Image (tube, rainbow, N blue to C red):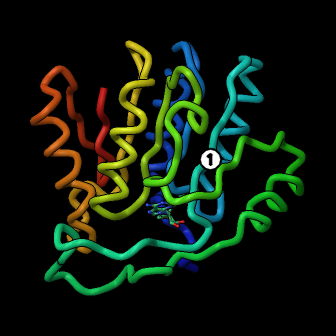
Amino acid sequence: MKDFLKQVSDQETKKLLELATLALETEGDFVELGCYRGDTSLLLEKLIENSKKSKKLWLYDSFAGLPEKTKEDASVAGDEFKASELFVSKREVVERFKKTGLKLPVIKKNFFENLNPETDLPEKIAFAFLDGDLYSSIKTSLSLVTPKLSDRGIMLVHDYNNPKLPGPARAVDEFLNKNPNFRLNLFETLAIIS
Ligand SMILES: C[S@@+](CC[C@H](N)C(=O)[O-])C[C@H]1O[C@@H](n2cnc3c(N)ncnc32)[C@H](O)[C@@H]1O
């Protein structure tokens, strides 16, 4: 049976974990901007703990669902993903971590636009999963993470080439135009930026 709460495909999850495993060797912590119920977050925390590396996982979400779309998110493929969709409480995510016995990551409840880059993000980032679905959410995520990204750090943006969500690809393309020193590789709807 299809799990309708699941946001990332099995193949994408496998690729994400493969890249996160490489990033274990890079200086810095792991971040996920747009953690929702914590499905991917649980896997990332387990990976870190099994590796015995002294890395931390930092999670970010409004825990109020999606913000309003902007014109860059308009899609002929449909009008799904409305404001406040994908709502989940922070408590629910905390409870899921407690049940597994994994350490609790740093969890920041806020809209990305209101985060303080100095105090709310790690000093160095080795691996970033940016899964905020919308143009402005991905644009903000890229601008928060890039200054902290280690030399060999990796950013993954979900929903690149997802016809229902054109915003992430727009934000990524704009970012790459302004930052030509970054390379783009694609895997399904994952944009791999390094
Ligand atoms: C597709 S879900 C994330 C799925 C998750 N990464 C996973 O692997 O299961 C998108 C999440 O991003 C959050 N989000 C989107 N834009 C945001 C913003 N600007 N600020 C904070 N949270 C945001 C939503 O609340 C939602 O929980």
Q: Quadrant of the C terminus?
A: top left
Residue sitting at 59 percent across and 28 percent down? 122
Q: Image height check: is 194 above or below 159?
A: above
In the foreground, 58 or 186: 58
In the foreground, 51 or 120: 120
Where residue 2 sits in the image (x, y, percent)? 53, 77
Q: Image height check: is 17 above or below 73?
A: above
Q: Residue furthest left?
A: 177
Q: Is residue 194 left or right of residue 93?
A: left
Q: Image height check: is 98 above or below 45?
A: below
Where residue 27 sits in the image (x, y, percent)? 55, 13
Give the residue pinned by disc 1: 59
Residue sitting at 42 percent across and 59 percent down? 132
**How many numbered callouts?**
1
Quarter of the image for residue 75 reads bottom left
Residue sitting at 30 percent across and 74 percent down? 69
Q: Quadrant of the N terminus?
A: bottom right
Kindly identify the amino acid type of the residue bearing the numbered disc 1.
Answer: Leu
Q: Is residue 36 left or right of residue 172?
A: right
Disc 1 residue lies near ligand 1 with CB under 8 A: no
Where residue 114 sits in the image (x, y, percent)? 49, 53
